[in-house]
Amino acid sequence: MGQEVTVWVPATTANLGSGFDCLGAALDFGNRFHFALRAGGEPLIIQGATVAGENLAYRAFALVYERLGQAVPAVTLTLALEVPLARGLGSSATAIVAGLRAAHYFLGEPLPDSQVLAWGVGLEGHPDNVVPAWWGGCRLTCGECVTAIPWHRDIIPVLAIPEFELSTAAARAVLPSHVPYRDAVANLGALGCLLQGLHQGSPELLRAGLQDHLHQPYRRGLIPGYDLVERAALAAGAYGVVISGAGPTLLALTAPREAQGVAQAMVQAWAGVGVQATARIAQVCERGAQVTAG
């Protein structure tokens, strides 16, 4: 294989309400990582990097070599990042997938993708961002089983991205170790409605399916203005509002004709409580990570 490779990895939105830790979708923007091998010198030289991007991308890169019993080569890593950090849009998953894909490319791709991806899930701790970042589309993961979930073309993801960060560790810390039996059953029903709603484009099923009982009731208090933003989006025509990943980005699903109004309403609602935010009307990206030589 060549001595340089570029890996583009899409942003992701995970959970989608009731799909906690098992459901995620790739989005139509992402991060670009360029890896150039060197004969020696410093193990890692960073260009245009952030701390999170450089650490995770290089850790994942080195992991593949180590698992295959190979010496980790010196590398120059250049990053062009479009996914904001600590916003619930899969920035860490982009770094992990990029490092894995680059190393696997340089080593001649001796393993099935599923094996390398499993190492990435181990690094991330859960599959809902890493799996769609690798494969693209909307993906449901249960253990080693991964399946594509059809996403109706008339369901538009609208992202409201606030200026503040929220770490995944902080969002995990507020979750209880146990939930009531009735909440677990309610979430099973909601997930079934969500999957059918995404497939059929049914507003009624989506409204039911976006109601989560496992993580959102505990995390919404970490996001200032959550209730106001949710009410504004629903009033503008959204089917529902959920936390994207661990947050603080909020995701609304809506019809195409309502998308612009929903986006504006969410940003304005946050501005009303002194939070600056930007909106992005996105699309689900059917392609996952792209590897290009040179």
Image (cartoon, grey):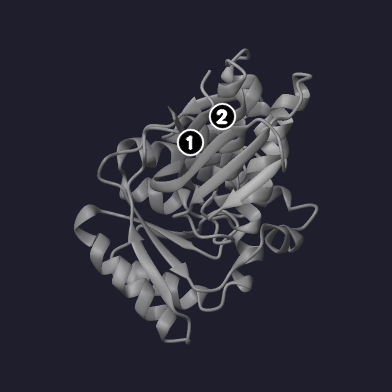
What is the three-letter code of the residue carrying label 1?
Answer: Val
Name the residue at the top extreme: 110
In the drawing, what numbered circle is on residue 101? 2
* Above-or-below relation of 115 to 286: above
Depth check: give the residue in front, 139 or 57. Answer: 57
| Mark 1 / mark 2, whichever is N-terminal | 1
Q: Report if residue 270 is visible in the image.
A: yes
Name the residue at the left extreme: 257
Depth check: give the residue in front, 189 or 59. Answer: 59
In the drawing, what numbered circle is on residue 94? none
What is the three-letter code of the residue carrying label 2?
Answer: Arg
Counting labels gives 2
In the drawing, what numbered circle is on residue 7? 1
The residue under the point 25% across, 45% down is 154
Whether tag 1 and tag 2 are in contact, CB under 8 A, the answer is: yes
Q: Dot 2 lies on which element?
A: helix
In this picture, residue 237 sits left or right of residue 278: left
* Above-or-below relation of 58 to 119: below
In this picture, residue 7 sits left or right of residue 266: right
Could you say which quadrant of the image residue 232 lies in?
Answer: bottom left
Q: For the residue carrying disc 2, how many other residues have a C-alpha within 10 Å: few (<14), some (14-19), or many (20+)?
A: many
Could you say which quadrant of the image residue 212 lies in?
Answer: bottom right
The residue under the point 54% across, 44% down is 94
Could you say which quadrant of the image residue 126 lies in?
Answer: top right
The residue under the point 46% across, 33% down is 289
Q: Position of residue 68 (x, y in %)?
A: 75, 19
Q: Dot 1 lies on which element?
A: strand
- Quarter of the rendering occupied by the C terminus: top left
Q: Report if residue 139 is visible in the image.
A: no
Depth check: give the residue in front, 220 or 4. Answer: 4
